[in-house]
Amino acid sequence: MSQKNKVALVGWNPDVVDYSKWPELTAEKLRAALEGDRDNLNSLGYQAELLYIVDADSAFDTVSRALEETEYDCVLIGAGVRTVDEHFLVFERLVNAVHESAPSAKICFNTNPSDTAEAVKRWI
């Protein structure tokens, strides 16, 4: 049997998100969507894990450490980090964390939880 491709799904811990921009969203709904993405990828034959970040100051170290501990084939940086203007510097740090700590991993991006599998499939 072939080894499963490992995928890291990087995003904000649902407990630290400011939901004022998305009043219909809650921590519970976001957590369910993220876990659903992970479970969907696992059902498709990947070995997917969620890597939650909790603040701008520790994001780089958190992701770097995780990528050094486990060799991932693909790292997805979620839309919640990428598309919110005030998180631009966090996104930049995370791209560099992947570049430094997992240089052979593919990097992909989703636009929302419903297209995470498609983003991963584009690269592995």
Image (cartoon, grey):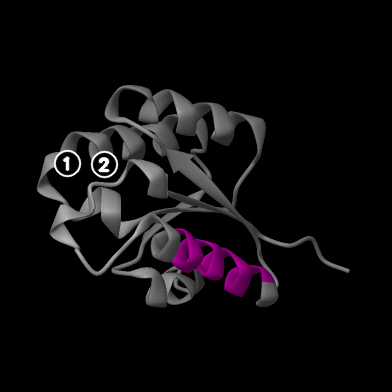
Asked if residue 12 can be seen in this view, the reply is no
Residue 25 x/y as whole percent: 29, 65
Report the Cα–Cα distance between label 2 and label 1: 5 Å
Magenta span? 31-42
Q: Magenta span has 36?
A: yes
Label 1: element kind: helix
* Residue drawn 40% across the image and 61% down it: 30
In the image, taking residue 19 as reference, residue 97 lies left or right, namely right
Q: Quadrant of residue 94?
A: top left
Label 2: element kind: helix
What amino acid type should be assigned to the residue bearing mark 1? Phe
What amino acid type should be assigned to the residue bearing mark 2? Phe
Q: Quadrant of residue 43?
A: bottom right
- In the image, farthest residue toward the left: 85
Which residue bears the numbered disc 2?
A: 91
Which residue bears the numbered disc 1?
A: 88
Q: Quadrant of the N terminus?
A: bottom right
**Residue 50: mark:** none
- Labelled pair 2, 1 in contact (Cβ < 8 Å): yes
In the image, taking residue 9 as reference, residue 6 lies left or right, namely right
* Residue drawn 14% across the image and 58% down it: 21
